[in-house]
Amino acid sequence: MLIAYIMLAVGGMLLGGAYSFAKQKHPLWSVALLSLAGLLCCVISLWRIFS
């Protein structure tokens, strides 16, 4: 359970990084990759918390 909460925090940081990359006009592939990684972390951690 602790790993799920840590993973949720990491997913939030990755999503924040993707937002920051988008605001700084980094390449679209890097924004998409960070967003996908962040969403994947958040979804997996929420699935583990609620199951």
Image (cartoon, rainbow, N blue to C red):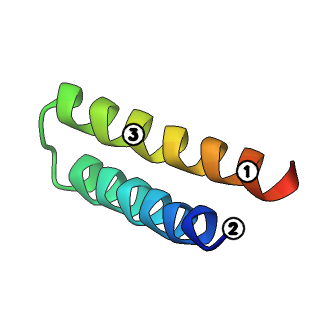
Amino acid type assigned to the residue bearing label 3 in the image: Ala
| First along the sequence among labels 3 and 2 | 2
Left or right for 48, reference 4: right
Give the labeled residue for mark 2: 1
Rounded to the nearest whole Å, what is the CA distance between mark 2 and mark 1? 7 Å
Rounded to the nearest whole Å, what is the CA distance between mark 3 and mark 1? 17 Å
Question: In this picture, is 33 found above or below 4?
Answer: above
Amino acid type assigned to the residue bearing label 1 in the image: Arg
The image position of residue 19, as x and y in percent, is 36, 54
The image position of residue 45, as x and y in percent, is 64, 53
Q: Which residue lies furthest to the top in this view?
A: 29
- Residue at point 20% right, 25% down? 29
Tell me whether the residue at label 2 lies in contact with that at label 1, contact meaning CB atoms closer than 8 angstroms: yes
The image position of residue 50, as x and y in percent, is 86, 54
Amino acid type assigned to the residue bearing label 2 in the image: Met
Q: Which residue lies furthest to the right in this view?
A: 51
Give the labeled residue for mark 3: 37
Question: In this picture, is 23 found above or below 12?
Answer: above
- Residue at point 59% right, 50% down? 42
Question: In this picture, is 48 found above or below 8?
Answer: above
Left or right for 30, reference 43: left
| First along the sequence among labels 2 and 1 | 2
| The label number, if any, that marks residue 48 in the structure image | 1
Q: How crowded is mark 3: few (under 14 residues within 10 Å), some or many (20 or more)?
A: some
Q: Is mark 3 on a helix, strand or loop?
A: helix
